[in-house]
Image: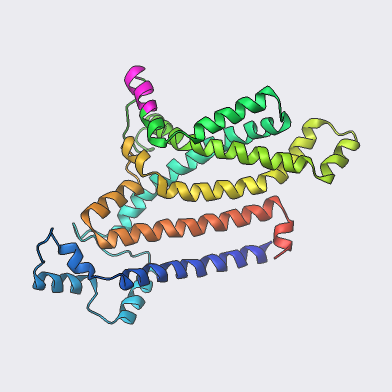
Amino acid sequence: MLRYVALRVLIALVLVWLVSTLVFLVLHLVPGDPAELLLSAGNTAPDPEAVAQLRSQMGLDRPVLAQYASYIADLTHLDFGVSLRDQNPIAPELALRLPRTLELILAAALIASLIGVPLGTIAAMRDGGWSEKLVSLLASAALSTPVFVVGTTLVLVFAQWLGWISAGGYVPLAEDPARHFALLAMPAATIALPLTAVMIRMTRASVLEVLEKDHVRTARAKGLARGPIIRRHVVRNALVPVITVLGLEMGTLIGGTVLVEYVFNWPGLSGYLVRAVEARDYPEVVGIVLVISFLFVLLNLLIDITYAVLDPRVKLAK
């Protein structure tokens, strides 16, 4: 097991390096001068002296290899540079906003798992019955509803009509835990709705497949009760592909929370990215893209390790 984890960690580190190098190359291969583009205003050409000064500030006047060496060295120290707008370091802002986005995504994944896996299992166990059709209908409706429609509907019902909670905002957990989780509930539920539909469908398909396996038929032939068969022999094996889908969807959610964070005024990473793009703050955009990419790699690493825990055959096959 340790050898398998060490190999996965090594592969993840190589991927981080490749992603960082790719981002660096893309930024230098794209036509145009970043400093000139940042200083451009409509059709007016920027002042050459200002462009030269910004190029020097961004280190673009140095040889490419020297820029790459400094770039990698800074990343090893989690140094993403300074913002062009206010000259403040980018890393503290990322460290402040990243946990908020991760909290939102993890809460949504938890909600989707707690609802989707049981409903998907019920739908598979009662395949063809009215409960299976009802669950499938609800999953289709949830999957086809855009997140901004869900978000605005929740705001309208719970904030405007019922007045149970504010329409949006953020309160630190340490300051007021009850209000923090109350404000987290609606954006997390908004993100969780389509993810729940995916979990239901994937769990149902996976459970139906496992039910046809020989070991399940053998357990039934031995006279084991239905409950233990489902818990020990069906759900555990069915969770492996479900976790794959959950991991991929969580990766997608990292870049898909922009609308939700905007609707609920949640100060996370996505809102920071929108602000950086609007301001054409080159270092901020690069830092955010790198952090999101690193999260994808970390997520894949966690999925691989979870595979090995749930199914020992995975690490034995490596």
Q: Is residue 12 left or right of residue 315?
A: left
On the image, which quarter does residue 134 sit in?
Answer: top right
Q: Position of residue 100 (x, y in %)?
A: 39, 44
Q: Position of residue 30 (x, y in %)?
A: 31, 70
Query: Foreground: 157 or 42?
Result: 42
Name the dominant secondary structure of the magenta segment. Answer: helix
**In the displayed structure, does residue 258 sit left or right of residue 15?**
left
Relative to 200, 41 lies left or right = left
Give 2 or 273, whichever is nearer the viewer: 273
Between residue 94 and residue 265, name the one nearer to us: 265
Q: Is residue 62 above or below residue 103?
A: below
Furthest toward the top, the residue is 162
Say how the picture is coloured. Answer: rainbow
For the point 46% across and 56% down, which residue is it? 295
The residue sitting at 43% across, 34% down in the picture is 190
Q: Where on the picture, by quarter, is residue 229?
A: top right
Q: Does 280 lie within the magenta span?
A: no
Residue 170 in view here: no
How far from the left and from the top, in percent, is residue 268?
A: 35, 45
Residue 52, x across and y down, in percent: 14, 74
Looking at the image, which residue is at 45% across and 38% down? 191
Does 266 appear above or below 17? above
Q: Quadrant of the C terminus?
A: bottom right
Please tell me which residue lies in front, 282 or 138.
Answer: 138
**Residue found farthest to the right:** 222
The residue segment tinted magenta is: 153-163
Q: Is residue 114 in view? A: yes
Asked whether residue 161 is drawn in magenta, I would say: yes
Q: Residue at x 31, y 72 (%)?
A: 28
Q: Quadrant of the N terminus?
A: bottom right
- Residue 128 vertical position relative to residue 301 in the rendered view, above or below: above
